[in-house]
Image (tube, rainbow, N blue to C red):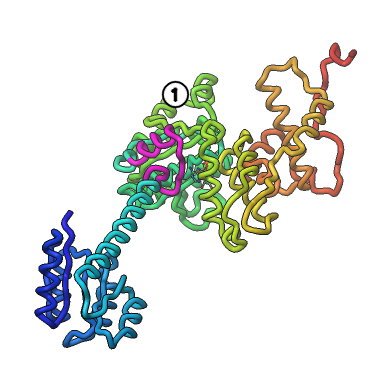
Amino acid sequence: METRILIVDDDPFICSQLEGLYRAQGYIVESATEAPLALAKLGEHDYSLVLVDLKIPGTDGLSLTREIRDRWQDIDVIMITGYASIRGAVDAIRLGASDYITKPFQNEEILIATDKVLEKRRLLDEIQYLRGQLADRYSFANMVSRNPRMHDIFSQLDALAQNDATVLLTGESGTGKELCARAIHYQGKRKAGKFVPINCAAFPDTLLESELFGYERGAFTGAVHDRVGKIELSSGGTLFLDEIESISLNMQLKLLRVLEEREIERLGGNRRIKVNMRVIAATNVDLDALVANGSMREDFYYRVNVVPIRIPPLRDRIEDVPLLVAEFLRNSPLAQDKGISRVSNRALQQLMGYPWAGNVRELGNVLERSILRTSGPVIKDIDLPGGDAKKSSEASSRRGFDYEVPLKEFLRRAEKDYLGHVLRKYRGGINSSAKHALVDAATLHRKMKSYGLRREEFRMRGAKADQPIFQIAAPPHSTQH
Ligand SMILES: Nc1ncnc2c1ncn2[C@@H]1O[C@H](COP(=O)(O)OP(=O)(O)O)[C@@H](O)[C@H]1O
Ligand SMILES: [Mg+2]
């Protein structure tokens, strides 16, 4: 690309001297003998460099320099001064001029100063460009990754933002499903509408229905006002159905109708209301299995599973850990306050060797704890959950699990035992227990309900402290050894 230079000097002799000099070097060069003319020219073409005489009629070179720096940050200014006004030159630099030259000057001086300024500009442009490239390569919306599969997902999300297809996000808890859903919404043409998330596991059936559909006054006892449901709210925007595996068969049917007809009726109402929302669903279970065992309607499954996207767990893209750590520290106000900017190599090794069952969310929690405990600019000490895993696994083997039962039942029992342990530890505190387990409070509630665990049982100090909540009865024949 050609480099265009403007000379602003009221002395026509200097102008033509410089023009000749620059032209001989292959630059495109023009001159202006006063400030307004100079500004007009700057507005017309893209200049790289302006040489400004400190003393020009109408205004002074300093004001002109200031104005150029304000309006065109990517144009460099070199100030030309007489011997007497070295002070003016210093002021010019302070105002953003890149260099100054004193009169009378040698041609050589001019060319060296010009080269220096333009070269620095070129480097700055290149750094900017490379930064942009890096950001593009490694991030999409608020997500970062250097994993090729994730990059495929980023471009898929980018494409999906441009249409209205129903998307099913699958992946373990904490892998970034909600983040992906938001990315689709906010990168797309629906961003003017609302992004409305609803965690389907957080509500029992009847409540879920009124959350989704809304109700009219008098629909049931307690319905004293009309209330707009989440579906209506998301009209024009995006409805994010999280944890869809927990939707009952009955509600699946109702939702299926909405997805097909794009119309709803509020509870207790008799008006059909048109809705126009995009649907994104998420789950951390294998829906095929639910269809196979009859707990998910096949027609509902097909309605939702139009564009499936499977987000890999963090342990399958462990190269993302350093990037996520950097991103987390950059975004953590506490880390900023404490001036923490990185983790030690040893700590990073630890983080990269951990299986991350709770994925990116768990990584965030672990870092948050470490930031709290760190003083100084580097996190050296990482406190990974399961530091006492050995102890607790010994404890569970002492409890004598029953290996004779089917896997599913075995897992149920283990989960119940785990939840009992955690709830006891936090004396029935739901938020702390949920945090410990890396599930959200609603999920914890749902699981407690399904296992018949009541928080009251855990409230009392030291209640049943050392006893497991339930004792798996070992089958009689195996107790003999
Ligand atoms: N690729 C990523 N880059 C940066 N942060 C991420 C990424 N993936 C997940 N997170 C963060 O991890 C946490 C969990 O993500 P979320 O979307 O809620 O997961 P999920 O819905 O799958 O449980 C959030 O705080 C989110 O911002
Ligand atoms: Mg989620």
At 48% across and 40% down in the image, what residue appears? 177
321 left or right of 65? right
Residue 457 or residue 78, whichever sits in front? 78
Count of numbered tags:
1
Q: Is residue 161 magenta?
A: no
Give x and y (percent) for residue 104.
Answer: 21, 80
Q: Secondary structure under badge 1?
A: helix
Around disc 1, counting alpha carbons within 10 Å, would you say few (fewer than 14), some (14 to 19), or many (20 or more)? some
Instruction: Say which residue appears at 62% left-offset and 39% top-offset.
Output: 349
Q: Position of residue 43 (x, y in %)?
A: 16, 69
Residue 363 in percent (x, y) is at 60, 43
Whether the magenta-drawn stretch holds residue 139 is answered as: yes
Q: Quadrant of residue 395?
A: top right
Residue 150, picture quadrant: top left
Residue 229 seen in the figure: yes
Above or below residue 113? Residue 192 is above
Please give left or right for residue 365 compared with residue 395 in the image. Answer: left
Percent x, y of residue 113: 27, 67
Depth check: give the residue in front, 14 or 340. 14
Q: Which residues are magenta?
A: 136-158
Q: Magenta segment, principal secondary structure?
A: helix
Quarter of the image containing the N terminus?
bottom left
Q: Residue at x 37, y 31 (%)?
A: 307
Q: Which residue is mark 1?
A: 298
The one nearer the camera, 433 or 348, is 348
Amino acid on which the number 1 mark rests in the picture: Glu
Find the residue positioned furthest to the right: 480
Q: Is residue 276 left or right of residue 181?
A: left
Q: Residue furthest top?
A: 477
Q: Residue at x 31, y 70 (%)?
A: 98
